[in-house]
Image (cartoon, rainbow, N blue to C red):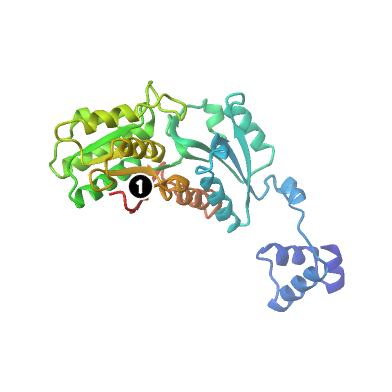
């Protein structure tokens, strides 16, 4: 900046104002000359030096609990990073796993002097952090902290279930079984929406048709599946369901296989619908799967807007709606 100032006969403060967008008083011609010479000299701002001086670097610290390792969940990271660049910021991520606490992850994120720190989880969860730890977080993504003190962005699971069930109703389906995800927040909220949609149509829920997709108190990808046995029992009823709603697309994949073994046509005999829109599954099933797309891209974009954009009043909890992806399975 001194080189530019000396060559153009202006002050270093004026050069800094032109290069960094400050409101230093100067003519448009002076600003143009400074920027042109900076480009000629290939001037680059030393963001580390500026960060040390100002106490903050142009980055968002992302503490990710399992998020980075799941292909579909990384949409949050991609979208957050892309949207942050609009504000001249980059995302620096650190992963939290079983051997590494949230406190450790947040401490590491702080070392980068970030403009803000966000904490994100791979699955929609409620988490609890000590007061001194949660105060380091500016925003939670895909999770809610039990104190409710820090703003959070989460998917609207209840809305998703209402929409997919109403879509089935609109196509004449009335007897809907639900192979849900036991023991997790998404499962309980989706069941709430499932019931709400029936109430709105003044239709009764068949209670025995709300079933856990896996054995055990909590759904995981490694739990023992109950899908095949449930499908056999459902299709063996005198009046079987005309639709099977699945807790996620992986459960739907199993339902397809179980129905095919029984010679049941999809959707002629039974429709199948689901949640998440994991594209590598949903698009490749035959017929392609009707499902509710998780709003991960919008969640990442909204998070960048909240922590990087102009600061204003931030709602404590933002619920982002899913999107209905209509395919041929209903």
Give the residue displayed 37% in from the left and 22% down from the top: 215
Question: Is the N terminus in the top left, top right, bottom left or bottom right quadrant?
Answer: bottom right
Which of the 4 image quarters holds residue 259? top left
| Residue sitting at the far bottom | 29
Establish if 34 lies above or below 46: below
Q: Is residue 156 visible?
A: no
Establish if 29 lies above or below 122: below
| Residue sitting at the far left | 202
Disc 1 secondary structure class? strand
The image position of residue 255, as x and y in percent, is 34, 37
The image position of residue 301, as x and y in percent, is 50, 52
Give the residue displayed 36% in from the left and 37% down from the top: 257
In the picture, measured across the screen, residue 295 lies left or right of residue 190, that is: right
- Looking at this view, is 119 or 247 the one in front? 247
Rate crowding at label 1 as few (under 14), some (14 to 19) or many (20 or more) other CA atoms within 10 Å: many
Determine which residue is flagged by label 1: 291
In the picture, measured across the screen, residue 140 lies left or right of residue 242, that is: right
- Looking at this view, is 179 or 285 the one in front? 285
Q: Is residue 83 visible?
A: yes
Give the residue displayed 27% in from the left and 35% down from the top: 178
- Looking at this view, is 63 or 181 the one in front? 181
The image position of residue 122, as x and y in percent, is 50, 37
Q: How many marks?
A: 1
| Residue sitting at the far top | 216
Establish if 85 lies above or below 205: below
The image position of residue 237, as x and y in percent, is 18, 31
In the picture, measured across the screen, residue 241 lies left or right of residue 295, that is: left
């Amino acid at each position: 900046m001194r080189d530019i100032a000396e060559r153009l006969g202006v002050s270093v403060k004026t050069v800094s104002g032109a290069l960094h967008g400050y409101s230093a008083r100067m003519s448009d011609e002076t600003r143009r000359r400074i920027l042109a010479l900076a480009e000629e000299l290939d001037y680059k701002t030393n963001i580390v030096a500026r960060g040390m001086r100002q106490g903050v670097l142009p980055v968002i610290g992302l503490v990710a609990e399992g998020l980075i390792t799941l292909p579909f969940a990384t949409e949050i990271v991609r979208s957050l990073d892309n949207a942050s660049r609009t504000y001249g910021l980059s995302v620096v991520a650190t992963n939290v796993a079983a051997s590494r606490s949230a406190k450790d992850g947040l401490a590491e994120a702080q070392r980068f002097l970030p403009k803000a720190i966000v904490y994100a989880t791979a699955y929609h969860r409620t988490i609890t952090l000590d007061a001194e730890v949660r105060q380091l977080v500016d925003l939670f993504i895909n999770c809610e902290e039990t104190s409710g003190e820090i703003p959070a962005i989460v998917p609207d699971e209840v809305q998703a279930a209402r929409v997919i069930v109403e879509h089935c109703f609109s196509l004449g389906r009335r007897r809907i079984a639900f192979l849900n995800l036991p023991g997790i927040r998404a499962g309980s909220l989706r069941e709430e929406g499932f019931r709400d949609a029936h109430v709105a149509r003044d239709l009764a829920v068949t209670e025995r048709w709300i079933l856990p997709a896996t054995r055990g108190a909590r759904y995981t990808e490694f739990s023992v599946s109950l899908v095949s046995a449930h499908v056999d029992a459902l299709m063996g009823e005198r009046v079987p369901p005309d639709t099977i709603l699945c807790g996620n697309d992986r459960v739907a994949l199993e339902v397809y296989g179980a129905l095919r073994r029984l010679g049941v046509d999809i959707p002629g005999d039974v429709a199948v619908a689901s949640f998440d829109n994991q594209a590598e599954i949903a698009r490749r099933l035959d017929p392609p799967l009707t499902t509710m797309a998780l709003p991960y891209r919008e969640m990442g974009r909204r998070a960048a807007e909240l922590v990087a954009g102009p600061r204003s009043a931030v709602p404590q909890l933002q619920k982002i709606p899913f999107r209905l992806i209509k395919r041929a399975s209903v």
